[in-house]
């Protein structure tokens, strides 16, 4: 209920500001922002984040420079350093490198008068220190989301003790990996046999490169009941992975995170059986709004959980059109 009320307040404020922009001209045209959408241009998930940020840029009249990172934490750190050197009014970053890597740079940026906020992956240390200076977070609560998906899968598909699961995730990234850990914890509590595979940097940046990994795993583990992809781009590629392994829609359960047009098709075709959506469009739109409001009015940081709900074949058509338009 609290999450819904916060979103209602924010969206009401957005509508008010958009109305003011229409009536009075651009409201924040003097503000310059560096924004991190995540992956690469055309990435199924990052492209939706980008569209959300681009819509906010157009609505509010600010100037935004977009920096794609191919989901590589080291690249995010280097790009954040470059952003600080450029001295924009604000920077919206993703927290994949973690607090230890980013906290000194955030200190530097704040000391230089740059507003910093975050999306997709939280940075709790910086958020705790700089909330009053506009540092917020827009994204899922990662561990809770992973645990919830794991629990739902056990219940929905009747998984039982001894069933084998492949979990493909990002445990090497301490904060980002919390979602993977949540899935594994839920499965292990149900006494499933969990085979964990780390998403390589190459597959992280280009999901179809993971096809031989799935084929090889399923060949050596023909008893696998379920595959979990903790990555929107990989979830969008589930149909390709399973077809490449010679599997039909009823052979292996496929679940993951994030709604995209490709994932909608995979659900329709039976290759993706369940996802948990996190509304990436909001992860683009709302950080731009956060920086604009903090710069102009001194607003503190907002912490907004964009995790929405489960999507499967029974309800996908309700959101399919928006996904195909790059909004959900």
Image (spheres, rainbow, N blue to C red):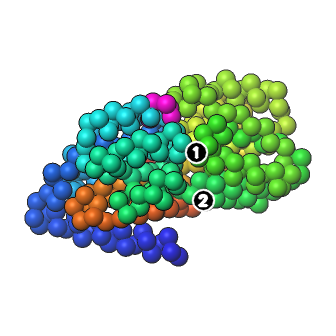
Q: Which mark is residue 34?
A: none
Q: Main secondary structure of the magenta part?
A: helix
Q: Report which residue position mark 1 lands on.
A: 176
Relative side of 26 to 101, left or right: left
Q: Earlier in the sequence, mark 1 or mark 2?
A: 1
Q: Give the range drawn in magenta.
A: 72-76
Residue drawn where x is 83% and y is 55% of the image? 190
Q: Which mark is residue 310?
A: 2
Work out whether residue 290 or residue 8 is closer to the camera in this orientation and state it.
Answer: 290
Q: Is residue 231 visible?
A: yes
The stretch drawn in magenta includes residue 61 = no
Against 64, residue 60 (above or below) is below
> Alpha-carbon distance for marks 1 and 2?
20 Å
Relative side of 42 to 188, left or right: left
Residue drawn where x is 72% and y is 45% of the image? 253
Work out whether residue 72 or residue 90 is closer to the camera in this orientation and state it.
Answer: 90
Residue drawn where x is 56% and y is 25% of the image? 202
Residue 221: percent from left, percent from top: 83, 31
Residue 268: percent from left, percent from top: 58, 48
Residue 302: percent from left, percent from top: 41, 64
Residue drawn where x is 15% and y is 51% of the image? 30
């Amino acid at each position: 209920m609290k999450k819904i009320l916060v979103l209602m307040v924010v969206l009401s404020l957005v509508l008010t500001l958009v109305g003011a922009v229409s009536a009075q001209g651009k409201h924040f045209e003097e503000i310059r922002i560096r924004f991190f959408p995540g992956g690469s241009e055309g990435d199924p998930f990052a492209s939706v984040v980008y569209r959300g940020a681009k819509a906010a840029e157009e609505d509010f009249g600010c100037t935004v420079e977009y920096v794609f990172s191919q989901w590589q934490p080291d690249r995010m750190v280097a790009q954040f350093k470059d952003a600080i050197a450029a001295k924009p009014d604000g920077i919206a970053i993703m927290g994949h490198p973690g607090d230890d890597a980013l906290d000194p740079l955030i200190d530097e940026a704040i000391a230089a008068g740059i507003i910093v906020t975050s999306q997709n992956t939280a940075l709790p240390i910086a958020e705790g220190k700089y909330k009053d200076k506009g540092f917020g977070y827009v994204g899922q609560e990662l561990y809770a989301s992973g645990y919830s998906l794991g629990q739902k899968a056990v219940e929905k598909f009747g998984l039982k003790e001894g069933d084998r699961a492949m979990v493909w995730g990002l445990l090497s990234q301490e904060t980002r990996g919390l979602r993977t850990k949540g899935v594994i914890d839920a499965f292990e509590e149900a006494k499933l046999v969990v085979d964990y595979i780390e998403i390589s940097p190459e597959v992280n940046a280009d999901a179809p490169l993971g096809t031989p990994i799935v084929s090889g795993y399923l060949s050596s583990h023909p008893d696998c009941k379920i595959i979990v992809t903790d990555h929107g781009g990989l979830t969008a590629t589930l149909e390709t992975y399973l077809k490449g392994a010679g599997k039909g829609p009823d052979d292996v359960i496929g679940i993951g995170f994030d709604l995209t047009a490709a994932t909608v098709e995979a659900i329709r075709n039976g290759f993706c059986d369940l996802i948990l959506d996190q509304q990436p469009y909001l992860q683009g739109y709302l950080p731009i709004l956060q920086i604009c409001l903090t710069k102009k009015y001194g607003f503190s940081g907002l912490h907004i959980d964009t995790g929405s709900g489960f999507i499967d074949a029974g309800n996908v058509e309700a959101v399919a059109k928006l996904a195909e338009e790059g909004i959900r």
